Image: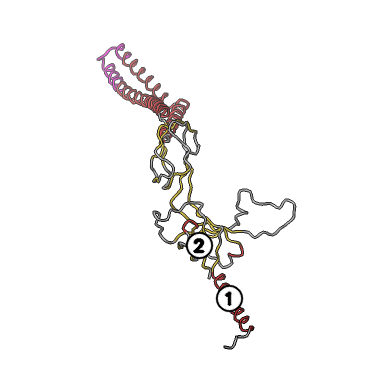
Amino acid sequence: MKRMPKRFFVTLIIAVISVVAIVFYIHSSKYQHTDDAYLESHMVSVAPKVTGQIIEVYIDDNDKVKAGDLVAKIDPVDYKIRYEELDAQYEKTLLQQNVAKANLKAANSEIELAQKDLNRYKKLYEAGAVSKQTLDSQQTKYDMALARQNQAQNDIFSNAKNKVADADLKRIKSQKDMAKLNLSYTNIYAPQDGYVTNKRVEKGAYVQKGQALFTLVSEETWVVANFKESQLKDMKVGQEVEIKIDTFGNKVFKGKVDSIQKTSGAKSSLFPPENAVGSFVKIVQRIPVKIVFTEKIDTNKYQLAAGMSCVPKVKVK
C-alpha cells in the first residue's frame, strides 16, 4: 500500500484546525459568557422601632416566614402604661371642654327663661298686679343669668383660652397617638416573605431602636453577571440566557437579560477609584447585567441561595 505523502497530513491538520477555529468563532460571536457572576436576592434587615427587653422570639435561623408573621415581642408594659396615662389625660381635657360647652348651653336656656319672666313681670307691674320690689327681684335674677351667660361665653370664645384649650387637646391627642403606635411596635412582624438568616437576638436580650435582629432573604432570586465592556456590543434586554450554577454542575437553567446597569461596577462602588496623580492605565471595565430566570424552579430540588457562583451564557445573535 502506497504511503500518503507528508504534505497531505499537514494539509489535513490545517484544515481541521481551520474548521474548529471557524466553528469556535461562530459560536463565540453568537454567545457571550462570564464566570464573574453570582445569585442575588432581596435582603431586609429586621430591627425594632422601639427600645425594650425581648420577651418572646418565634423564629430561628433558616426558618421560612410570611410577610406579617409575628417574629418577636418586646415587653409592652411600660408602653401600655404610657398610653393609658395619655388616654386618661386626653379624655379629661376633652371632658373639660365639653363641660364648658354644656355650661354655655345651660346659661343660654336660663337667660331665655329669665328674659321671658322679666317681660311678663314688667307687664304685670304696669297693670298694678305686682309691686316694684317684685319687679326688681325679677330684674336681679335676669342680671345674674346674663352674667352667667357672659362668663360661659368667655370660657368658650375667649381667644386666648380657646387657643390654649385647643392646643392642649391637639398636643395630648398627638402624644396619645404616638404612644399607641409605640405600643403596637412592641410586636415585631416580618416585613416580607423569606428565610431567616444571621439571627442575632435571643429571649431576654435588651434591644435598642434600630438594632438589627436578623436578616430576611427573599425567595426571589436573580443573577448579577459582570461582563467585560467589550462583551456588551450586541447584548440587549430580553435576550435568552443559559445559566449554570456551580452547585448543580451541568444543570442548565433558562433565563433572560432583564437590564444592563448604566455604570460600571467600579464607578458605582462605595469608593470609586480616582486618578489623583494624573497617571492613567487603561483597565477593562465590567458592567453588571441583571438576568432573571424564565422557568419555574423546583426549590425542593434546587435550593438557590444568594451568593452562589454561576456562569451565564447570553445568546446575542
What's the residue type where badge 1 is placed? Ile
Q: Nearer the viewer, residue 159 or 141?
A: 159
Q: CA distance from mark 2 to mark 1?
A: 27 Å
Residue sitting farthest toward the front:
1
Q: Nearer the viewer, residue 33 or 220?
A: 33
Q: Is residue 117 left or right of residue 158?
A: left
Asked where in the image residue 204 lies, by quadrant, the reply is top left
Residue sitting farthest toward the bottom:
2
User: Mark 2, residues whose alpha carbon is within 10 Å: few (<14), some, or many (≥20)?
Assistant: many
Asked where in the image residue 165 lies, by quadrant, the reply is top left
Q: Is residue 280 left or right of residue 259?
A: right
**Residue 261 visible, this angle:** no
Query: Residue 286 at what x, y percent from top left?
Result: 60, 59
Which SS class for mark 2? strand
What residue is shown with label 2?
257
Which SS class for mark 1? helix
Range shown magenta: 115-136
What's the residue type where badge 2 is placed? Val
Residue 119 drawn in magenta? yes
Q: Nearer the viewer, mark 2 or mark 1?
A: 1
Query: Residue 186 at what x, y percent from top left?
Result: 42, 34
Query: Residue 149 at what x, y percent from top left?
Result: 37, 22
**Disc sitting over residue 22 in the figure:** 1
Residue sitting farthest toward the left:
129
Query: Residue 153 at what x, y percent from top left?
Result: 40, 25
Q: Residue at x 43, y 36 (%)?
A: 185
From the viewer's perspective, is residue 293 above or below residue 269?
below
Q: Is residue 228 left or right of residue 43?
A: right
